[in-house]
Image (tube, rainbow, N blue to C red):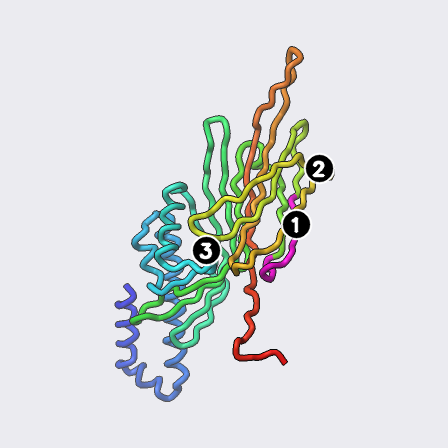
């Protein structure tokens, strides 16, 4: 389809209207620019369409072979990650809102808002919901006449996987959007548990890597003020991090002098912390 569009543009420039454009060189630039804008929008919207259909080959074809993700993954690693996600959650529905497109010759920068949703029930008695939102920037490059995604960066990212009574909670998980490497920062979790419910929670920090290594969780009873905080030190490997809050909800059933606890809900809230690389001293600069 893109080749057809390019052919139509070419035909426009050999018609009388094309010759008339010689009186205004800027018109040529605007026509090409508008066509590039349409192609870029089409590319990103097709990504969503392919993802919703879990069409892996078509989806990956929208990326440059030299693609580098916001977390340093090359195309091979990113491809493996996508396969894993779709194998586990094959009914995720994706959406994208294009906020701004800036084109400079064969390079383009696109600001977007992305979201995803899926029903992920644990059993017939416990529903589950996955939601994710992100503000991202896509970097595109025109290769052999076609736009491809060559890199991206994630400004903010918030994902939740909630089950049972946890679905209705107003969960606030906060941490800095970005911190320098090897620097202290605080993450805070706040929510009000349902009445007559015992709530436990933990906050952990995971480096963004593949395969993902799960951090050790230390569950605590939610304090009376419903706020749990934890201090972290950002890694010195210049790798981005996820703050992961885990939540458990239980109710006590007292009968015949015995207490039985039943799980009524649980879930995870995840936010991104971008780690700024440590400045490397120039080896050619000597201390004075």
On the image, the x and y values in percent for residue 11 come to 26, 76
Q: CA distance from mark 3 to mark 1?
A: 34 Å
Q: Earlier in the sequence, mark 1 or mark 2?
A: 2
Horizontal arrangement in the rendering, residue 10 relative to residue 80 (left or right) = left
Decide: is 119 above or below 80: above
Mark 1 neighbour class, 10 Å CA radius: few under 14, some 14 to 19, many 20 or more: few
Decide: is 153 above or below 142: above
Q: Is residue 182 magenta?
A: yes
- The circle drawn on residue 194 is none
- Residue reaching furthest to the bottom: 23
Q: Is residue 237 magenta?
A: no
- The circle drawn on residue 223 is 2
- The circle drawn on residue 96 is 3
Mark 2 neighbour class, 10 Å CA radius: few under 14, some 14 to 19, many 20 or more: few
Helix, strand or loop for the magenta stretch, by majority: strand
Q: Nearer the viewer, mark 3 or mark 2?
A: 2
Q: Nearer the viewer, mark 1 or mark 2?
A: 1
Horizontal arrangement in the rendering, residue 221 relative to residue 38 (left or right) = right
Dot 1 corresponds to which residue? Answer: 231
Residue bounds of the magenta highlight: 177-189
Say which quarter of the image contains residue 103: bottom left
Q: Secondary structure at mark 3?
A: strand
Q: In terms of depth relative to the viewer, which is nearer, 202 or 95?
A: 202
- Name which residue lies at 39% across and 86% down: 24
**Quadrant of the drawing holding the C terminus:** bottom right
Mark 3 neighbour class, 10 Å CA radius: few under 14, some 14 to 19, many 20 or more: some
- Residue reaching furthest to the top: 256
- Name which residue lies at 73% across and 36% down: 224
On the image, the x and y values in percent for residue 215 come to 53, 44
- Name which residue lies at 63% across and 34% down: 200
Q: In terms of depth relative to the viewer, which is nearer, 74 or 287?
A: 287
């Amino acid at each position: 389809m893109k080749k057809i569009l390019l052919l139509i543009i070419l035909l426009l420039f050999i018609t009388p209207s094309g010759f008339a454009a010689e009186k205004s060189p800027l018109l040529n630039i605007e026509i090409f620019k508008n066509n590039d804008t349409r192609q870029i929008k089409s590319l990103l919207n097709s990504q969503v369409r392919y993802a919703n259909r879990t069409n892996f080959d078509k989806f990956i074809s929208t990326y440059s072979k030299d693609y580098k993700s916001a977390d340093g993954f090359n195309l091979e690693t990113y491809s493996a990650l996508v396969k894993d996600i779709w194998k586990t959650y094959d009914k995720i529905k994706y959406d994208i809102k294009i906020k701004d497109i800036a084109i400079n010759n064969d390079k383009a920068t696109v600001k977007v808002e992305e979201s995803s949703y899926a029903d992920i029930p644990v059993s017939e008695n416990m529903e589950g919901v996955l939601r994710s939102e992100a503000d991202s920037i896509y970097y595109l490059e025109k290769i052999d006449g076609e736009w491809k995604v060559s890199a991206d960066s994630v400004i903010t990212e918030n994902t939740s996987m909630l089950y049972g009574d946890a679905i209705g909670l107003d969960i606030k998980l906060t941490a800095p959007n970005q911190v320098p490497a090897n620097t202290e920062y605080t993450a805070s979790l706040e929510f009000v548990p349902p009445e007559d419910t015992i709530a436990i929670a933990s906050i952990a920090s995971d480096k963004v890597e593949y395969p993902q290594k799960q951090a050790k969780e230390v569950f605590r009873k939610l304090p009376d003020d419903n706020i749990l905080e934890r201090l972290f030190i950002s890694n010195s490997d210049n790798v981005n991090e996820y703050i992961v809050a885990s939540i458990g909800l239980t109710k006590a059933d007292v009968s015949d002098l015995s207490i039985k606890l039943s799980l009524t809900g649980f879930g995870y809230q995840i936010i991104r912390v971008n780690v700024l690389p440590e400045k490397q001293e120039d080896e050619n600069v000597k201390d004075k």
